[in-house]
Image: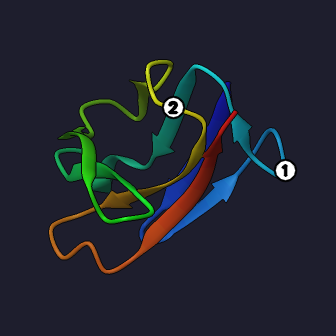
């Protein structure tokens, strides 16, 4: 598991720096971010997964992703991307 903690527009890898992720990406956020959409995109910009932050800890199952680098984008403006590596 890799856990990211969101505080407004910042994300911090809280448990495994640097961040290889195997099966599940846990996104922790404060209550003000609940209801925001997220997407996971490949390095080519292809949207892989999308969803909504519904809990202060949202678990995103990524075990079916091929190995490689991906970006987690959160929010309507999606002006920041947070890199993670699927191991």
- Colouring scheme applied when the structure was drawn: rainbow
**Residue visible at 83% across and 52% down in the picture:** 18
Query: Label 1's element?
Result: loop
Q: Nearer the viewer, residue 29 or 74?
A: 74
| Cβ atoms at labels 2 and 1 below 8 Å apart | no
Residue 66 disc label: 2
**Residue visible at 37% across and 65% down in the picture:** 44
Give the residue number, with chain letter if any, for mark 1: 17
Q: Nearer the viewer, residue 29 or 24?
A: 24
From the image, which quarter does the C terminus lie in? top right
Relative to 80, is 37 above or below? above
* Position in image of residue 27 (x %, y %): 48, 39
From the image, which quarter does the N terminus lie in? top right
* Position in image of residue 43 (x %, y %): 45, 63
**Residue visible at 24% across and 51% down in the picture:** 47
What crowding class fits label 1: few (fewer than 14 Cα within 10 Å), some (14-19), or many (20 or more)?
A: few
What crowding class fits label 2: few (fewer than 14 Cα within 10 Å), some (14-19), or many (20 or more)?
A: few
* Position in image of residue 21 (x %, y %): 66, 34
* Position in image of residue 52 (x %, y %): 20, 40
Relative to residue 32, is residue 6 drawn left or right? right
Relative to 60, is 80 above or below? below
Query: Label 2's element?
Result: loop
- Among the two numbered marks 2 and 1 on one chain, the one whose residue lies closer to the N terminus: 1
Relative to residue 68, is residue 47 drawn left or right? left
**Residue visible at 57% across and 61% down in the picture:** 83
Q: Nearer the viewer, residue 49 or 78?
A: 49
Q: Nearer the viewer, residue 42 or 23?
A: 42
Mark 2–mark 1 distance (CA, rounded to whole Å): 21 Å
């Amino acid at each position: 598991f890799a856990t990211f903690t969101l505080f407004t527009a910042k994300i911090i890898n809280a448990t495994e720096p640097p961040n290889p992720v195997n099966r599940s990406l846990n996104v922790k956020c404060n209550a003000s971010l609940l209801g925001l959409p997220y997407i996971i995109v490949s390095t080519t910009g292809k949207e892989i997964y999308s969803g909504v932050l519904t809990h202060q800890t949202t678990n995103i199952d990524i075990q079916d992703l091929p190995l490689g680098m991906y970006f987690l984008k959160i929010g309507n403006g999606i002006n920041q991307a947070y890199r993670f590596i699927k191991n």
